[in-house]
Image (spheres, rainbow, N blue to C red):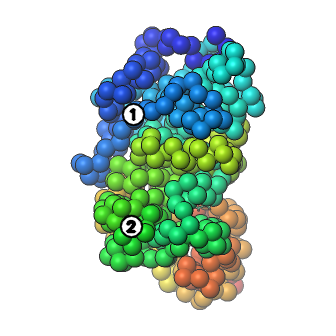
Amino acid sequence: MEPGFDPPEVPGGTGAFGLLGQHLAVCLELQASRTASWSVADGMAPIGRPAAASSPRCGIVHGPSTSSAESEDGARGLWVAWSRRYAREVTDQTHGFETLAIHAGQDPDPRTGAVAPAIWATSTYKQDGVGGLREGYEYSRTGNPTRTALEGCLAALEGGARCLTFASGLAAEDTLLRGLTRPGDHVVIPDDAYGGTYRLFDRVAAPWGLAYTPVPVTDVEAVRAAVRDGETKIVWVETPTNPLLGIADIAALAGVAHDAGALLVVDNTFASPYLQQPIALGADIVVHSTTKYCGGHSDVVGGALVTRTPELAEPLAYLQNAVGAVAGPFDCWVVLRGLRTLAVRMERHCDNAERIVEMLTGRPEVSQVIYPGLGEHPGHVVAARQMRRFGGMVSFRVAAGEQAAVDLVSHTELFTLAESLGGVESLIEHPGRMTHASVAGSPLEVPGDLVRLSVGIESAEDLVADLAGAFEAVRA
Ligand SMILES: Cc1ncc(COP(=O)(O)O)c(C=O)c1O
């Protein structure tokens, strides 16, 4: 046995690892004959989910189990091998979100017992004779055990069949578009979205031949009117949207997309899998910039795709290997470490955001506070149904206009003036001139008086005092 790899016979034992480990061994044998239950619903009671939604964990596997990863069947062959690592459970037993975050995909090392996942800094793997791959590993663009661990964990947290991780969120989005659409196809996109996502559609995919229509994804009927039967391949939503925090009704939009023969893709970056699980609500693919809440510490750039079925992942895995925008082992390890504390961080992000919203609501300098947790937010009812809580992102409009907003974001001390979001430290930015500068003049242009906060997990009263101080400083 090669050091560090799972042995062919999975060790038993007691406790969570032993129990979960035993399931590993039988997964492959069982997955062709039964649909596994891999639900985190028991641990996530507050999140609404339609009864019809299901999250098969170990899907039907096709293809040979020993094919070379560089061959046409490589991705399938690897999926068979990697299923051993993903499929930690094939009974009706379920685990809570926090348990999955700490254990899914992360067995203690069978040789040393190390409880923390290893960083597999290797480009290649010894073969036992030509084509004799151990656990399917051949070359690290195609597969790496640290990446496998992260992908297994994130698939479990999103309730998906399979996860693929990338060098950035945009690399994941690019692979999704090129893997599942062709020139001449049409996609529906949000009229409020991360500027880089819009740039990808407008400046990269459109010249390639992919038509797109921006619509308010907060309006189900507007989306229905925009889909073209047979032509629309993807309805793409963010929810909450970036930066206006609009809420898309995932279950309703899944119906609209599926009626038109399209897939529903949900960018779940703002909510994180702790607050919202789109696949359980009917989405087909979840997108993450793992740079944000999944990593959680502003120290890594990464992306992920999680698919409802193994089949949906096949063209994406093929392209991931063929194009190669993969996440490196160290980056995977950093994101995996972040996921382990996602639940507690998100609770604190939400607590602090609520306190900031309370403070902003009373300020005369603020003309509008935008937060899905507020009763007057137009998406509040849907958000309450499909999210556990309302998140750590808060936007607001400055009554005195754009220049006052620009001045304000330069006058905080704890809130760091910076792009990005989802880290433990609080960030403040002016979307119109920063994250969303690339959508100026487009249907996605954002108001000039808008300020966006990524509320961190510092002491809430310090954050309140910091913002109050900035308002005072700008007024002086
Ligand atoms: C909602 C959303 N999706 C995708 C991305 C792109 O991710 P990355 O910056 O990791 O490429 C971002 C980046 O800010 C984002 O905010």
Does residue 129 appear left or right of residue 32 in this picture?
Answer: right
Please give the name of the residue rendered at 25% of the width and 49% of the height, measured from the top-left corner.
52
Mark sitting on residue 230: 2
Given the image, on which type of amino acid does mark 2 rest? Gly
Asked whether the viewer can see residue 297, the reply is no
The x, y position of residue 274, in whole percent, is 45, 47
Foreground residue among 261 and 469: 261
Ligand 1 located in image quadrant: bottom right
Mark 2 packing: few (<14 Cα in 10 Å), some, or many (20+)?
A: few
Residue at coordinates 53% horizontally, 13% vertically from top-left? Answer: 8
Image-quadrant location for residue 20: top left
Task: Please tell me whether residue 428 is drawn above or below residue 13 in the rendered image.
Answer: below
Q: Residue at x 50, y 84 (%)?
A: 367
User: How far, Cα to Cα, is label 1 from label 2?
Assistant: 27 Å
- Which of the marked residues, 1 or 2, is nearer the chain's N terminus? 1
Tell me where residue 405 sits by quadrant.
bottom right
- The residue lying toward the viewer, choosing from 141 and 196, is 141
Locate residue 401, reporting x and y percent: 60, 88
Q: Report helix, strand or loop for mark 1.
A: loop
Q: Nearer the viewer, mark 1 or mark 2?
A: 2
What's the residue at 59%, 38% (across, down)?
72
Compared with 305, 108 (above or below) is above
In front: 316, or 279?
316
Q: Check if mark 1's residue and mark 2's residue have beta carbons within 8 Å.
A: no
Q: Is residue 119 above or below residue 341?
A: above
> Residue 60, which numbered label?
1
Residue 111 image point, x, y percent: 63, 12
Local crowd at mark 1 within 10 Å, few (<14), some, or many (≥20)? some
Mark 1 Cβ and ligand 1 under 8 Å apart? no
